Amino acid sequence: MADRDENSALIALAELRNLEADRVAAEEAKRRAKEDAERKAREDAERKAREEAERRAKEEADRIARELAEQEARDREERLRLQEAELRARAEQEARLREEQMRLDAQIKMTEKKARPLWLTVTPIVLGIGLIIGGYFAWTTIEERDQQASAERAAAAQRDAENKKALETLMAELNELKAEQERLEKERKELDSKLAEVQDETERQKLLAEKAALDAQLADNKAKQSKNKKKSNTGDSGSGEAPKKKPAIEVKKTDDPLDGL
């Protein structure tokens, strides 16, 4: 009878131990499932943040490239406009010179035929000399305008090169920051995995300190990316709107053969 009671007690104790083991196993499985869910949620959040950063970086690069292309198109149109104005001014000046020369030739012939007084003969010659001098100064002005237009084209080309170099530098920095962020996030995931498995409290505190340092580096990296984006937003416009350029040639309509000389 005593042996039977002892066997029943042992069986009951074994069942209690099995129940306790099942309970512990269930709690452990629940804890691991919770940690897995938290890790998955954290990884999803990090992936979304990384994709958002990549999207914003791409949009920023596209915006800068688009503005550079628009600036190049405006500079090209301005150069063409200046060239057309110069050509028109030269054609008008040459036409005026030819017309005035023909008029002077006709006056000289009429003077010779009618044998007018000396002052009437000399006057057209003086006018012709004045016209030649005026044409020379007009041509000199055109040459100066040509040099000014060439300098402006060179300055525009230099601005384009500087803007392109700035864009390349910005994109290189953004790519470096992106690579650094991916490396830090990878290290952070490895630390999370180690923290989920570590048992020693000293080692756990050490890993937590490393994780805090990584979080600080990630925050600094994100701040640098934001700072670079602000630089690109404020640095494209330069010192403001470019001053309006004066027309390359200003042609005045006048009946004075010396054109005010």
Image: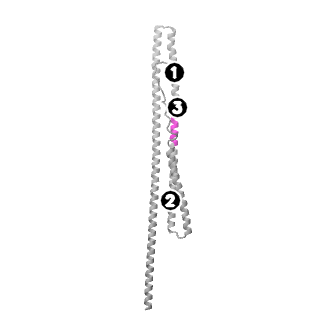
- Residue situated in front as seen by the camera: 130 or 219: 219
The numbered mark, 2 or 3, whose residue comes first in the sequence reads 3
Number of numbered discs overlaid on the protein picture: 3
Badge 3 element: helix
Which of the two marks, 1 or 2, is nearer to us in this view? 2
Residue hosting label 2:
185
Q: SS for tag 2?
A: helix
Residue picked out by circle 3: 148
What's under tag 2, amino acid-wise?
A: Glu
Q: For mark 2, does the 10 Å Cα neighbourhood hold few (<14), some (14 to 19), or many (20 or more) residues?
A: many
Cα–Cα gap, marks 1 and 3 = 21 Å
Q: Residues within 10 Å of mark 3 (few under 14, many from 20)?
A: few
> In the depicted view, which residue is nearer to us: 215 or 128?
215
Q: Which stretch is magenta? A: 145-162
| x and y percentages locating residue 26 in the rendered image | 43, 73
Q: Position of residue 152 (x, y in %)?
A: 51, 34
Screen quadrant of the N terminus = bottom left
Q: Main secondary structure of the magenta part?
A: helix
**In contact (CB < 8 Å): disc 1 and disc 2:** no
Which residue lies at the image location 46% right of the left edge and 28% below the top edge? 87
Crowd band around label 1 with a 10 angstrom C-alpha radius: few (<14), some (14–19), many (20+): some
Which one is in front, 155 or 115? 155
Asked if residue 161 lies in the magenta stretch, the reply is yes
Disc 1 to disc 2, C-alpha distance: 76 Å
Residue drawn at the location 46% of the way across and 51% of the way down? 56
